[in-house]
Image: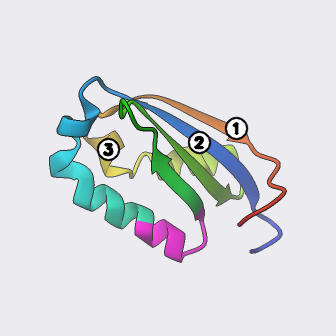
């Protein structure tokens, strides 16, 4: 991983009924995630279960602003399925 990138913990809070509402957007969202993972920008991603109301993602990016701009391209964001986003610097010790 390039040394000029920082690690960030991103949390999404989803709209009510996300498990059903995401269905038409899920293939594009998973493709977006896969492309970022392949590029080495996304280290980990997954939804919290029972209920599906949040997600956790770990990214590598030059800064929080650049990452927030990237998150706008998430098909879930474009479909207004995310009601809250938190981007925090993350002190990665193991993994990545």
Q: Which residues are magenta?
A: 34-42
Asked where in the image residue 68 lies, by quadrant, the reply is top right
Q: Answer with left or right where residue 44 lies relative to residue 9.
A: left
Question: Dot 1: what SS?
Answer: strand
In the displayed structure, would residue 70 be above or below residue 36?
above
Q: Which residue is mark 1?
A: 88
Question: Dot 2: what SS?
Answer: strand
Q: Find residue 10 and name its label.
A: 2
Asked where in the image residue 59 lies, by quadrant, the reply is bottom right
Cα separation, mark 1 vs mark 2, equals 6 Å
Image quarter of the N terminus: bottom right
Residue at image position (59%, 42%) is 10
Residue at image position (51%, 76%) is 38
Cα separation, mark 3 vs mark 2, equals 14 Å
- Tag 1 near tag 2, CB within 8 Å: yes
Residue 39 within the segment the image draws in magenta: yes
Q: Whole-percent x and y of residue 95?
A: 74, 64
Q: Earlier in the sequence, mark 1 or mark 2?
A: 2
Q: Answer with left or right where residue 29 lies relative to residue 12.
A: left
Q: Earlier in the sequence, mark 3 or mark 1?
A: 3
Q: Tell me if mark 3 has few (under 14), some (14-19) or many (20+) residues whose alpha carbon lies within 10 angstroms of its own.
A: many
Residue at image position (24%, 60%) is 27
Cα separation, mark 3 vs mark 1, equals 20 Å
- Tag 3 near tag 1, CB within 8 Å: no
Q: Whole-percent x and y of residue 55?
A: 47, 40
Image quarter of the C terminus: bottom right
Q: Answer with left or right where residue 54 lies relative to residue 19.
A: right
Q: Whole-percent x and y of residue 65?
A: 63, 44
In the displayed structure, would residue 9 be above or below residue 3?
above
Q: Which residue is mark 3?
A: 76
Question: Dot 3: what SS?
Answer: helix
Q: Earlier in the sequence, mark 3 or mark 2?
A: 2
């Amino acid at each position: 991983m390039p040394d000029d990138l920082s690690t960030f913990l991103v949390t999404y809070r989803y709209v009510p009924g996300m498990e059903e509402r995401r269905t038409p957007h899920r293939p594009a969202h998973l493709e977006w995630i896969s492309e970022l993972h392949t590029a080495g920008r996304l280290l980990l991603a997954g939804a919290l279960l029972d209920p599906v109301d949040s997600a956790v993602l770990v990214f590598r990016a030059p800064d929080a602003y650049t990452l927030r701009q990237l998150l706008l391209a998430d098909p879930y964001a474009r479909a207004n399925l995310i009601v809250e986003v938190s981007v925090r610097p993350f002190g990665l010790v193991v993994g990545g």
